[in-house]
Image (cartoon, grey):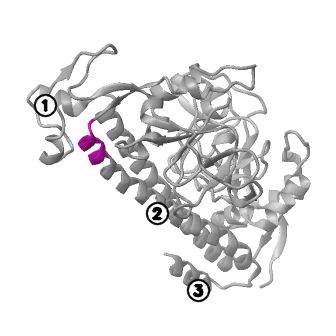
């Protein structure tokens, strides 16, 4: 298939940036998303921000704002990462990125988005960016970046194909976020707020559960040294209810799955696919274990994972900065992961860190003193059955999203080059559906 290579700037009708410096921010207002919100593996930007701008700043500070269908392009840190601007646009952009607007008369916008993510264009960006500690891609060099431009019909076929597949991946990830929110809400309701017990105490039927499950809960509280606790339950320290860094055997030098800190997510329980590496010094874990980052800033950023990506009985290893948590019976395995995402636990861990500035860590014995409410066996097992179904569905969706993303990124350059036709690509994807 023949195509032209055209300068990036010739294909654009606008480039919107943020004046190259930080705008006034506050705790409320319009979200200001930064480069850390731009994920090359996702379709849309994440909104995990704590910075906001006022209406006045929004209307007076910026040279312009992104519009639906624009492409967010990171210029500094990890240059070339892109996300699609959704409709409506309910955010503004911080420095070190721009919003580029395709000229629809010269290029199909969804194709340009796909082309920017292709290995051919990304390799150009890698070769052109400057800086070693903090790489950046100069806006003045946009005209030197060349984009492969096939016929309009081919652009639409490739662009729609790439975008449609990305939407499927996004839907799977959004579904997982919803499923995890349900599990977290259940954890908080049962083990933090004691909602079923309070409902029965007040003569009400507990919400969201059948009669058999409701019957497992007591209808009263009892006093303890740490305050009220459901009757028949008890407060225990974490080290009594969990194994902290449980013993896992792995021969030194043996090849085994490896998960490093960068592979552990700040949201969601699934880490990236492990790589094989000869075992050295580090934490060891298996399916059913939870990984918690112990060091700053990873702990504050929320790095945690539930391990369910290994073969049965397989031992993996990873960073020395992981604390490995495993609940003791009757608590289910997923209890540890949900605890690690619970705000009160995270705040306790963060406040308990010690060490020199920039290298602070939470110690095992300190973490082990965190108090949790331990239910009776029947309630723990009922909770385990409910969250197990959620955890397994999350794992299934994550695996499908990973498979589709790998296929999408593998097929894209072959589609652009003409080595692969769309019907063949669709057939490959159908086999993995």
Specify whether residue 28 is in view. no
- Residue drawn 52% across the image and 77% down it: 432
Mark 1 and mark 3: Cα distance apart in space: 59 Å
The quadrant the N terminus occupies is bottom right
User: Which of 58/305 is in front?
Assistant: 305
Q: Give the range drawn in magenta.
A: 376-383
Position of residue 47 measured from the top left corner of the image (x, y, whole percent) = 55, 40
Q: SS of the residue at dot 3?
A: helix
Query: CB atoms at circles 1 and 3 under 8 Å apart?
Result: no
Specify whether residue 236 is in view. yes
Q: Nearer the viewer, mark 3 or mark 2?
A: 2
Mark 1 and mark 2: Cα distance apart in space: 36 Å
Q: As drawn, which residue projects farthest toward the left? A: 203
Q: Quadrant of residue 51?
A: top right
Position of residue 407 measured from the top left corner of the image (x, y, whole percent) = 63, 72
Give the residue number, with chain letter if any, for mark 1: 200
- Residue drawn 61% across the image and 69% down it: 162
Q: In the picture shown, does residue 71 fall above or below 293? A: below
- Residue drawn 71% across the image and 67% down it: 107
Magenta run includes residue 377: yes
Closer to the chain start, of discs 1 and 3, is 1
Magenta run includes residue 330: no
Query: CB atoms at circles 1 and 2 under 8 Å apart?
Result: no
Position of residue 31 measured from the top left corner of the image (x, y, whole percent) = 56, 33
Q: In this view, does 166 lie to the left or right of 106?
A: left
Using a 10 Å C-alpha cutoff, classify the residue at mark 3 as few (fewer than 14 neighbours), some (14 to 19) or many (20 or more).
few
Mark 3 and mark 2: Cα distance apart in space: 26 Å
């Amino acid at each position: 298939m023949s195509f032209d290579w055209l300068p990036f700037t010739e294909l654009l009708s606008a480039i919107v940036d943020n004046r190259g410096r930080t705008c006034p921010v506050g705790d409320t207002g319009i979200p200001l998303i930064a480069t850390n919100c731009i994920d090359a593996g996702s379709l849309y930007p994440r909104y995990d921000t704590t910075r906001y701008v006022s209406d006045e700043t929004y209307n007076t500070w910026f040279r312009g704002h992104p519009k639906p269908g624009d492409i967010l392009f990171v210029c500094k840190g990890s240059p070339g990462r892109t996300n699609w601007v959704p409709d409506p646009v309910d955010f503004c952009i911080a420095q070190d990125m721009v919003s580029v607007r395709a000229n629809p008369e010269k290029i199909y916008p969804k194709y340009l988005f796909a082309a920017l993510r292709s290995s051919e264009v990304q390799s150009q960006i890698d070769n052109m960016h400057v800086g070693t500690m903090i790489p950046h891609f100069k806006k003045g060099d946009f005209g030197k970046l060349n984009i492969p431009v096939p016929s309009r019909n081919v652009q639409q076929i490739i662009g729609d194909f790439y975008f449609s597949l990305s939407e499927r991946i996004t839907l799977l990830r959004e579904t997982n976020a919803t499923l995890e929110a349900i599990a977290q809400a259940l954890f908080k309701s049962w083990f933090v707020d004691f909602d079923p017990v309070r409902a029965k105490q007040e003569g009400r039927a507990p919400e969201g559960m059948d009669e058999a499950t409701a019957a497992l809960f007591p209808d009263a509280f009892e006093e303890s040294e740490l305050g009220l606790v459901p009757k028949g339950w008890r407060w225990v320290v974490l080290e009594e209810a969990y194994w902290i860094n449980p013993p896992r055997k792995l021969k030194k030098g043996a090849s085994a799955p490896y998960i490093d800190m960068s592979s552990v997510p700040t949201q969601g329980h699934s880490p990236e696919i492990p790589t094989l590496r000869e075992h050295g010094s580090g934490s060891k874990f298996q399916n059913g274990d939870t990984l918690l980052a112990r060091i700053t800033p990873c702990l504050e950023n929320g790095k945690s994972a539930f391990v369910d990506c290994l073969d049965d009985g397989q031992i993996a290893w990873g960073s020395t900065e992981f604390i490995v948590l495993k609940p003791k019976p009757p608590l289910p395995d997923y209890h540890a992961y949900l605890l690690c995402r619970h705000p009160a636990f995270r705040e306790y861990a963060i406040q308990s860190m010690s060490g020199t500035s920039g290298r602070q860590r939470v110690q095992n014995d300190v973490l082990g003193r965190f108090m949790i409410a331990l239910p009776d066996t029947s309630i723990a097992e009922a909770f385990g059955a409910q969250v197990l179904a959620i955890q397994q569905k999350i794992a299934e969706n994550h695996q499908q999203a990973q498979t589709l993303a790998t296929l999408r990124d593998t097929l894209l350059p072959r589609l652009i080059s003409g080595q692969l036709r769309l019907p063949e690509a669709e057939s490959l994807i159908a086999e993995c559906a």
